[in-house]
Every structure is written in C-alpha cells, then in structure tokens.
Amino acid sequence: MPAALGVSVARGYDFNSIAVNRMPGEAVGALTKLVRADKELTLNVEYNQLDPLLRATVNPEGDVPNEQGFSIFPGNINVLVVRMKSYVRILKESQGIIAEFVNPKYADESRTTFKKPTRIETLMQDLPKLFGPDEKVGVSIFDRRWSFSANKNKIADAAAKQASGGSPESAATAESDFYHANRTRLIAAGATINEAPEELILGVPIVPGPKVLLRPSFAMTLADARGKISGCTLSDEATLVLNGKDIQLENVELAGRSALIVNACEGATVVVKGRFSNDGFELVKLTEAELASDRVPEYLRIRGYRFENRGAATYEFNEPGAYVVEV
C-alpha cells in the first residue's frame, strides 16, 4: 500500500487499481483500456465478460497467455487508491449510485441450473466510469505470490483448478504463499534461504519450508528487517517466528528441521546468536478418516495437514529488559 500510494502521488492518479498477473480465463476481473472513437477508459472488466469482449473485438482467440504464461490483462484484486477530492465530487454528483449488473454462476455447461443464487451487484471498481476527462486512472502491478493469495476454494475444487492450469487459491496455498512472502523479506535483509521443493497435498501444491512468520511488531518494512538481521541462514525444513520490535538476529542458523520462536514484549531487547538444532515442527498429512471427521478442527481439514511440535526452541520475554539468546 505505501508503494501504491507513492505511485499514485508521483503519477497524479485520481484512481489507482492494485493488480497482479492473472492466468487466462481465471475468475478474476481484468484491468483493460477500453477505446471507442476518441474516448478511452481504463477500467476493470469482469472475467465472465472479458473473453467474449476480446473475441468480438481485438482477438478471435479470446484471453490468451503471453510468453510468461499470463494474460496480457492484469488481475484486479480490489485494493484501490482514490484521490479524496475526486471521490467527494463524485459522491455529491452521483449520491453513491453505480450501475447494477448480475453475474450468474452456472452449475454446468448446460447453463440451466445455478451453482448458487444470482444477485444484483454493484462494483466499487466501476468508479472510474464516473470520472471526468481530466481525472487520471492508473494500474500498479505487483508480484502475485507475495502480495495476493486468495483462500476461497475447498480442497477438491483447488486440486481441480491446479490440474486445469489455474490457481488453486486454497487454505494450503495461501499459507504457503504467506511463508514465501516472509522469506522474500528475509532474503532482502541478507538472509540465506534454502527453499524446499514443491509438493502436492491432496492435489494442491505447497512449498513446505522454510516456514517464516515475521510479525508486524518485528518488521513492517524491508528497512526494518535489514536493520535487525546481520547474518541468518535457514534450511529448507526450518521454522522461524519473530514477534517483538527489538529482536536482533546475529549469525543465526537453523539447521535441519529446527524451529526458533521468539516472543518479546514492549521494552524487551533480545539478541539471538548461534546455530540451532532441534526437531522443530513436522508436517503431518491428514488421513482419509481425519479429513472426514467432524472431530478434527475445520481449519485443519480445509488445508489437509497439521504441524506437530517435535521440540521447537521457544523463548518468551514478558518483562522489559536486555536479553541474549546464544547457543
């Protein structure tokens, strides 16, 4: 968001849509430039309308991949930056009324039965339709894997989407991508990361490690992370959880399946040093019986596995002070 806000100011945008790369045919609205005669409009086009629009106008093949396998139309994730002055003007003129539409979800190709009830909708991303000719609309595209990872499909649907070349968008992939985002931040801070190979759980791909959680209290920005890490190496099965604004890592290594968890209260300054070697957390896939059992918590069943603590090194600092953890 800070980056998108900066771009909006630098480019003078009245409306800036944050977007990610999308797969052709993916159920995500697409950012496009619509042109008719002498009028141009940068606008989201809903995914169910995009392919027919392209086939009827610029490309008879519809929504096709580019050299990298992505659609040439980035995906709208409905994170929007709007200039307040323009927004207030439009609210006064429109009273907040935006054109309605319906987006039916059919159960099968016969298009005779609804998958779920169809409703009338209005889209906040349609706001540019009410802009004047002097108001600017832009798009800021971010790397999808560390900025947007939806969690909206049950395991069976996620596996089917994966098999067809789409994005699974499941609990397991969202969790995996969250760890990736934090690993990316560590790497930017100079850490050495050995990433595990991808594996399938019930047909859904995840990268099982290393698992990294950098809480907001530890680092909100890359600069925060760089200032608190001077030497860090993680194996492909390691787990690292840091929660506290005054935690420093100095030449820390997590070997094998080792796990390190540090929780530090406000006023607790903690310096962590050394090579940790323990049995950490083990990823245990759920059995068929567990997947079908109501006695297993739903948050486990929707992702297909659980983590079991086999000896993680956990440090709790609940009183202000200066501490050193060295092994």
Image (spheres, rainbow, N blue to C red):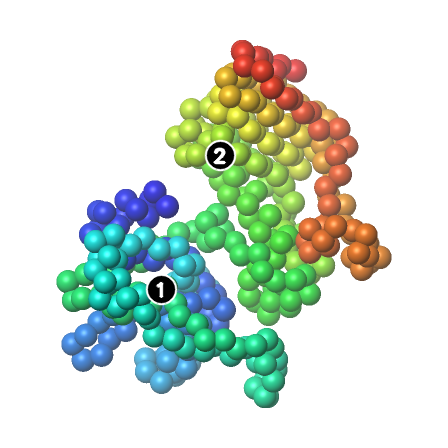
Residue at the spot of label 2: 216
Packing grade of label 1 (10 A; few <14, some 14-19, many >=20) is many
Q: Quadrant of residue 237?
A: top right
Q: Amino acid at mark 1?
A: Gln
Residue at 22% in and 66% down: 93
Residue 169 at x, y = what percent?
57, 59
Helix, strand or loop at label 1? It is helix
Q: Amino acid at mark 2?
A: Pro
Q: Is residue 87 left or right of residue 28?
A: left
Residue 131 at x, y = what percent?
22, 65
Q: Quadrant of residue 30?
A: bottom left
| 174 to 91, vertically: above or below | above
Between residues 110 and 196, which one lies in front from this camera angle? 110
Residues at marks 1 and 2, CA–CA distance in whole angstroms = 29 Å
Residue at the spot of label 1: 125
| 290 to 324, vertically: above or below | below
Q: Is residue 59 left or right of residue 35?
A: right
Return the mark for residue 267: none
Q: Quadrant of residue 129?
A: bottom left
**Residue 32 in view of the camera:** no
